[in-house]
Image (cartoon, grey):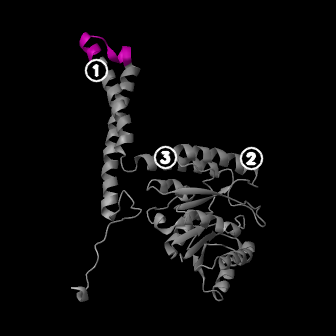
Amino acid sequence: MKMLSIVVPIHNEEPAILPLYDRLTTVLERLKKPYEIIFIDDASTDRSFDLLSNLVETDHHLKVMRLRRNFGQTAALSAGFDEAQGEVIISLDGDLQHDPDDIPLLLEKIDEGFDIASGWRKNRVDNAVTRRIPSRIANWMMRKSSGVDLHDFGTTFKAYRAEILKDINLYGELHRFIPALASFYGARIAEVPIRNIERPNGASHYGLGRTFRVFFDIVTIKFLLTYLTRPMHFFGKWGLAGIALGGLVMLYMLIEKIIGHDIIMEHGPLLVAGALLLFAGISFFSTGLMGEVLMRTYFESQGRRIYAVREVRCRREPQVTDGAR
């Protein structure tokens, strides 16, 4: 049977630790599959780590990691993914807003052959102004940018095949966009409606200010998905456009100068604009070339591939043993 790894990043979630652990254990025992639970303490300042340390002494399924400082949720998830031993990895938040009873629903999609089963908070209980409306806008932008048809990119509650995560390097705040990044390697993604429970204790660590960071991440994801292996296709077209327009303006200025016109007095602003366009075009073109070199250096130096193999099949010849000769 496939081993399950449950990855739970936490930061100052002391009131939720014990209830979440009890509910996770109950659900996982019912599944009758080998499992492990990995809590990643992102430098909590309350007693979260102490509670988890006590639980480790009584449960061999449990593992607790403590980061040296508060690196953020993406780094905590990445640490958990690297530590996980399971063939299927499930991540969820540690604030009890995700119901462990929905884990079997995610696993059903993995068993059907999907690589990622992504939770969808269909009926959200968050504040409409600070959470739901900005989330809908961000999710719509993400769907259009990535081409991945998901309603809810932001939730952490997802199930992954472990081999999919090996092809993805997380940094910044890109954990919410793992399905989009995985789509670059052809991952099959399903969406599963999950329950969204009102946070029983404490306050959310996210506010309206996160919306701007999400927008920057969307731009990054769009560039990575479209131009990661061919940056010249992005910078080159703008570079050529700038060089062409600037070149035409400067050619016109040269003709005016030959005719005898005072181009400084008559066409000063146009001359400056043409020069700026020309130099900007050359800069964009040079940036594209440098991007091509850096991209190749990145892949070749680390032995990384720009593709991912799902499976290999071939016809095997029957083995002849010594006794059959």
Q: What element carries label 1?
A: helix
Structural distance between the alpha carbons of marks 1 and 2: 54 Å
- 60 lies above or below 310: below
Task: Give me the disc on residue 251.
Answer: 1
First along the sequence among labels 1 and 2: 2
Residue indicated by mark 3? 222
Q: How crowded is mark 1: few (under 14 residues within 10 Å), some or many (20 or more)?
A: few
Q: Position of residue 84 (x, y in %)?
A: 52, 74
Task: Give me the disc on residue 282.
Answer: none
First along the sequence among labels 3 and 2: 2
Query: Magenta segment, which residues?
Result: 254-267
Structural distance between the alpha carbons of marks 3 and 1: 36 Å
Quadrant where the N terminus lies? Answer: bottom right
- Residue that protrudes farthest toward the front in the picture: 324
**Looking at numbered disc 2 in the image, what kind of residue is underneath it?**
Val
State the residue at coordinates (37%, 14%): 266
Side of 320 relative to 152 (left or right): left
| 124 drawn magenta | no
Q: Where is residue 293 in the image (x, y as percent from the top left)?
A: 30, 51
Q: In which quarter of the image is residue 7?
A: bottom right
- 69 lies above or below 237: below
**Looking at numbered disc 1 in the image, what kind of residue is underneath it?**
Leu
Task: Give me the disc on residue 129.
Answer: 2
State the residue at coordinates (57%, 48%): 149
| 266 drawn magenta | yes
- Residue that protrudes farthest toward the left in the picture: 325
Can I make out residue 72 in this image? no
Structural distance between the alpha carbons of marks 3 and 2: 26 Å
Q: Where is residue 191 in the image (x, y as percent from the top left)?
A: 61, 56
Quadrant where the C terminus lies? Answer: bottom left
- 47 lies above or below 99: below
Q: What element carries label 2?
A: helix
